[in-house]
Amino acid sequence: MIRDKLILAGAAGVAGGIIKAVIIQIAFYLGFSKVTLTSFAASLFLPAGLLTTAGGTVVGLVTHLLCSILFFLPFSYALEITGPDYHFSKGLGFGGAVWLVNIGLIAYFTPCLSLVRTDTGTLLSFLVGHLAYGITAAFIAVRYGYRVPADK
């Protein structure tokens, strides 16, 4: 059991972030998405010409994983307050909310907008990835961090 909330949020956020990245990468390889997650994240800091380079991929992956942790931290506290019941549904709602924030707000005010709003397949691939992120992160947080009454 992980008792430190920051470490728990880090572990759950990274686990969910990896699942999200894999899903979106598979969607990209299958032609459903026109953009990879690492390119989307790297576009916060790099010009378009550098997004698909090795350096751009590293910047994108680090950015994505740090954002995964940052977004999950407040939700991990919400899970502790509300309890582990229905964590699948809570994770699903959280993933959808993060998708709305990322695509609706962050992408709107940054250069990312032109990358991710290319077509419906890309948007839906990112939605599925974000939903899986929320479910995975919530599962990890509940499985490894929730204190049952017998532990007290």
Image (cartoon, grey):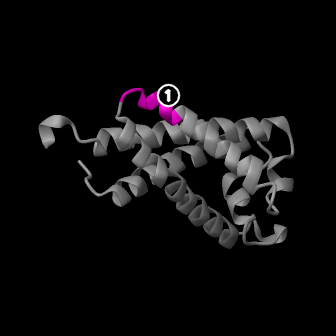
Placement of 86 over or under 139, stated as above or below: above
Q: Residue at x 68, y 37 (%)?
A: 127
- Residue assigned mark 1: 89
The answer to whether 84 appears left or right of 49 in the picture is left
Residue 31 appears anywhere in the view? no
What amino acid is labelled 1 in the image?
Ser
Q: Residue at x 50, y 36 (%)?
A: 91
Is residue 81 located in the magenta-colored stretch of the structure?
Answer: no
Q: Residue at x 77, y 40 (%)?
A: 123
Under tag 1, what secondary structure?
Answer: helix
Image coordinates of residue 142 in percent, x first then y, are 34, 39
Q: Residue at x 39, y 36 (%)?
A: 82
Name the image quarter holding residue 80.
top left
How many labels, in total? 1
Q: Which residues are magenta?
A: 85-91
Quadrant containing the C terminus is top left
Which residue is most to the front?
81
